[in-house]
Every structure is written in C-alpha cells, then in structure tokens.
Amino acid sequence: MMKKFLIVGLGIILSTLIYGEEKMLNKVRFIFDNREIVVALEKNSATKSLLVQLPLELKFENYGGIEKISYLPKELDISNAPKSCTPKTYDLTYYSPWGNLAFFTKDFRHSNGLIPLGKIESGFENLEDIDKALSVRIEKLGDEIYE
C-alpha cells in the first residue's frame, strides 16, 4: 500500500514538473495615450531577451492591414525559440529577419522567421489604435525573469 502511495505521489510531482510549469509566465504591458495592452509571454529565449531590454519606448506602424509593427533597438535571442508560427489575432510575435515586434490584428498564414512571443490578455480593444500613438512604453509586470 505504501508503494502505491509513493508511486502516485511521484507521478503527481513529475507531472507538475513537466506539465505544471506554465507556458505563459511573465507579462508585459504596452502603455500609450492613457490606454494599456497586457500581454502574457511565452517561455522562450526571445521573450527572455525582450524582458531584459525593458522598459522601452517605441513607435508602432500599420503593416499590410493585419499587423502593427515596431522595430526593436537590439535583436532578440532566438536560439531557444520556435523558428516559425501561424499567428492568430492578438498574438505578439517577433519577425527575426527584420528585427521587429508584430501584433496581429487578423489571423495569418504560417510564416518562417516569425517567433511567437505571447498573446494579448487584456486591452484587446486598444490594439487597433496603437499605431496612432506618438510613443508606446513597454514595461514588465512583476519583477521575476524566468531562468
């Protein structure tokens, strides 16, 4: 009976270690014109290197009617990140060939070089106007940066 409890207990601990670690760990906010967009970030090397650069002041522009993009001052580390993705509406991505952040306002096709960074959690209604702001401040919500 004790072995059974031990095995079940170890199974719970292992599944917590494997599956319990949330994929979305850190959050950032985009602040502009008294508005806010909160993004839950994925856990990968690109998001970690983005967090290290914060806070940032950027300018966004409309790109192709489906993206709101802004160029980062430094490239993100993509060594431990997916090298492509199929973006959905409200996804935040990094286009590695150009070095820009991209919010998607519509679903888009699978794209090589497009690194998933996260998804808007709140402030969806503000995304449409982010490119009209003179400046957008990006900052961390919370202090921890995952290892």
Image (cartoon, rainbow, N blue to C red):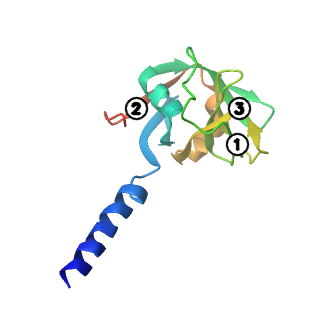
Q: Is residue 50 left or right of residue 84?
A: left
Q: Pick out the residue farthest to the bottom.
A: 1
Alpha-carbon distance for marks 2 and 1? 22 Å
Residue on which the image places disc 1: 105
Disc 2 secondary structure class: strand
Q: Amino acid at mark 3?
A: Gly
Q: Residues within 10 Å of mark 2 (few under 14, many from 20)?
A: many
Q: Pick out the residue farthest to the left.
A: 2
* N-term mark: 2 or 1: 1
* N-term mark: 1 or 3: 1
Q: Residues within 10 Å of mark 3 (few under 14, many from 20)?
A: some
Q: Residues within 10 Å of mark 1 (few under 14, many from 20)?
A: many
Q: Nearer the viewer, residue 124 or 67?
A: 67
Disc 1 secondary structure class: loop
Q: Nearer the viewer, residue 7 or 83?
A: 7
* N-term mark: 2 or 3: 3
Q: Amino acid at mark 2?
A: Lys
Q: Quadrant of the C terminus?
A: top left
The residue positioned 20% from the left and 85% from the top of the image is 1
Residue 53, position as x, y percentages in the image: 45, 20
Residue on which the image places disc 2: 140
Q: Amino acid at mark 1?
A: Thr
The part of the image, by quadrant, that contains residue 76 is top right
Residue 33, position as x, y percentages in the image: 52, 28
